[in-house]
Amino acid sequence: MGKNRRQSALAKSIQSGLLRDPDRFKKTAWGKIIAFFTFRRIKLIRHEQDLFAKLRQEVWNFNEDEYQSSFHTTSGQAPLKMIGDLGYSGSTFFGTFDGRLVIKSLPRRFEYTFFETDFLEPYYEYMHRHPDSVLVWITDYILSPYVTLGTLCGCAPAHHIIMENILCGQADDPAGNRWETYDLKPIDYFYPERDLVPAPLVSEDTLSRLADTFNDKLRLWQKDYNAFWEAIQADTKFLQEANAVDYSLFMVRIPATSSPKVLGRRSPWRAGIPSTDGKWKYRAVILDFFWARHKLHAQAMSGVVQTFNVVGRQGPMSITTTADEYRQKFLSMVKEMIEVYPE
C-alpha cells in the first residue's frame, strides 16, 4: 500500500510538472520552506523548455498539440501508468496511456549532473545535425527547483527525462503479442551494476530484464544497412567524445504485416526497417548513455570494481573500460548481428 501511494504521488508530481508553465513559477523563501518538508508530492518544473520544444518541432516534426495531450488524462484516470523499476539504480519508469512516451527518473547524482551540465547542449546540437540519429529522442526534462526531504531521503526522485517509446503502437496492433524486445550490450563485459548486487536484494524478473541475447540476425538490404551503420557509427562517436560508456541498443522486432503508428519524424529505425526475408521489421534506439567515465562516482566505482575484479577475476568491466574501447566493442556487437543482402 505504501509503495502504491508513493507511485501515485510521484505520477501526479510528474504530470503536474509537465503541465506547469515554468515561466510563471516563482521561487520564494516561504515556498522553499514549505517545499523542504515535502516527502512524496514534490513540485517539479520543466528544465530548458525552449530547447526541448525546438527539438520536438524543428528536428523531430512532432505535432505539439498531440504531444501535450499525452500528459492529459480524463476524469478518474490515473495520470500515468507505472511500467516498473530496474532495481539497481533506483530508476522508476512511467508511461503515458497513449503509449507514446516513457518517463524515466534519474535518481543518481552523477547521472543527472552529467546530463544537465555536460551532455544536454551537445545533444541538442548533435540532433539538429543528425535528425535520423539512432540515439533515443529525449523530448523533455523535469526537475525539482527545491531541495525536499523526499528527495534527500530517496522517497521521491527529483529528476526525470521524458523520451519516445520505441514500443509506440504495440497496444493497437492485432499482432502486438508477437513483438520481441532486446536490450543489448557487448556480452564480453562484466556488469558490476548487475553482478555485484546480492541476488536476494532483487527479483528474478529484474535480473531477467537487465541484458538480453539476440540469437538471430538482422537481415538487411544493402541500402538499409548503409544508412543504419552510418548512423550507428556517428552516434557512438558522439558518445565516445562525451566520454559515455555502458549504453545499450534497444531493438524491437515486429511482424512485417504490422504498420504501427510512430511519433513525429518517420526515420527508418523508428518506422521499422524491413527484413530481407519479409518476416520482420526492426526498430532500434541507443539508450542509457548517462554513465560518464569522468564523473566522480564512476571513477570511485571503477576503483571498487577493479579491486573486486582482482579477487573475482571477472574480466573486463563496462564501467572500467574507456569510452573508445566500449565503442569498439559495441560496434562489433552490432556488426556481428547483421547479415547484408545485395539489392
Image: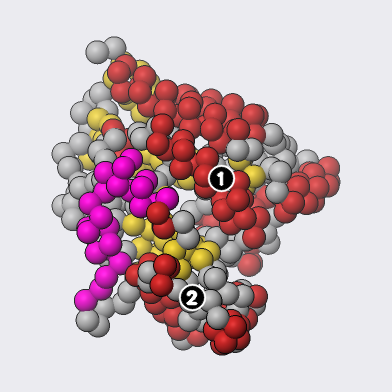
Tell me where residue 64 appears, x and y as whole percent: 25, 55
Tell me where residue 201 appears, x and y as whole percent: 63, 67
Q: Which amino acid, mark 2? A: Lys
- Residue at 31% over, 42% down: 58
- Residue at 22% over, 32% down: 279
Please state if 96 lies on the left or on the right of 208 as rendered.
Answer: left
Q: Is residue 219 magenta?
A: no
- Residue at 40% over, 54% down: 50
Most common SS among magenta residues:
helix
Between residue 178 and residue 91, name the one nearer to us: 91
Between residue 223 and residue 242, name the one nearer to us: 242
Please state if 189 lies on the left or on the right of 80 as rendered.
Answer: right
Q: Is residue 33 visible?
A: yes
Instruction: Identify the magenta region.
Output: 51-74
Q: Is residue 100 above or below residue 133?
A: below
Q: Any mark on residue 307, and which?
A: none
**Which structural element holds mark 2?**
loop
Please state if 80 lies on the left or on the right of 34 as rendered.
Answer: left
Quarter holding the C terminus is top left
Please state if 181 lies on the left or on the right of 266 as rendered.
Answer: right
Tell me where residue 99 appears, x and y as whole percent: 28, 58
Q: Any mark on residue 26, and which?
A: 2
- Residue at 36% over, 19% down: 226
Q: Which amino acid, mark 1? A: Phe
Q: How far, Cα to Cα, is label 2 from label 1?
A: 27 Å
List the residue tagged with mark 1. 119
Between residue 53 and residue 317, name the one nearer to us: 53
Q: Is residue 312 visible?
A: no
Which comes before the other along the chain, label 2 or label 1?
Answer: 2
Tell me where residue 281 appears, x and y as whole percent: 26, 35
